Image (cartoon, helix red, strand yellow):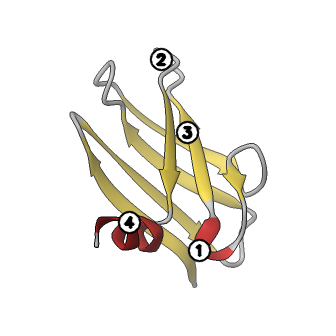
Amino acid sequence: MIEYITTRILDNGKIRILKLKEENFATIEFLCPNCGKFEKRKEKWEEPFLIGKGKNQKFFVKCNFCGYSLKLEKLRKEIKKKK
């Protein structure tokens, strides 16, 4: 069963995060907006990858090829900011 899933289109890239309830890690598919390389990996569902709980969660993803860092907030929080 899915606990959390998001797919986002970034400037010159995209990211997808999938977390299943029965697993303690998330699968990340990442097209880096900086270097353009595709990466697929698993991250443990805890700090430093995941900060906060509920609607205040933030995800920190770093490209292993070029070191580009990305902070991804929960979509609900981003939608509220735009209104």
In whole angstroms, how far apart are the C-alphas of marks 3 and 2? 12 Å
Label 1: few (<14), some or many (≥20) within 10 Å? few
Label 1, on which residue?
A: 55
Query: In the shown orientation, is residue 42 left or right of residue 77?
Result: right
The tag earlier along the polypeptide, 4 or 3, is 3
Q: Is residue 52 left or right of residue 26?
A: right
CA–CA distance between discs 2 and 1?
Answer: 30 Å
Residues at circles 2 and 1 in contact by the CB criterion of under 8 Å: no
Spot occupied by residue 25 in the image (x, y as percentages of width and height): 69, 58
Crowd band around label 2 with a 10 angstrom C-alpha radius: few (<14), some (14–19), many (20+): few
Position above or below: 10 against 32: below
Say the numbered circle drawn on residue 81.
4
Sequence order check, earlier mark of 3 and 1: 1
Q: Quadrant of the C terminus?
A: bottom left
Tell me: 17 left or right of 44: left
Question: Which of the marked residues, 4 or 1, is nearer the chain's N terminus?
Answer: 1
Q: Which residue is mark 2?
A: 65
Amino acid type at circle 2 is: Phe
Q: Could you give the CA–CA distance between mark 4 and mark 1, rounded to whole angstroms?
A: 13 Å
Q: Nearer the viewer, mark 2 or mark 1?
A: 1
SS under mark 2:
loop
Residue 61 horizontal/vertical position (percent): 55, 39
Give x and y (percent) for residue 7: 35, 60
The label on residue 61 is 3
Q: Nearer the viewer, mark 3 or mark 1?
A: 1
What's the residue type where badge 4 is placed? Lys
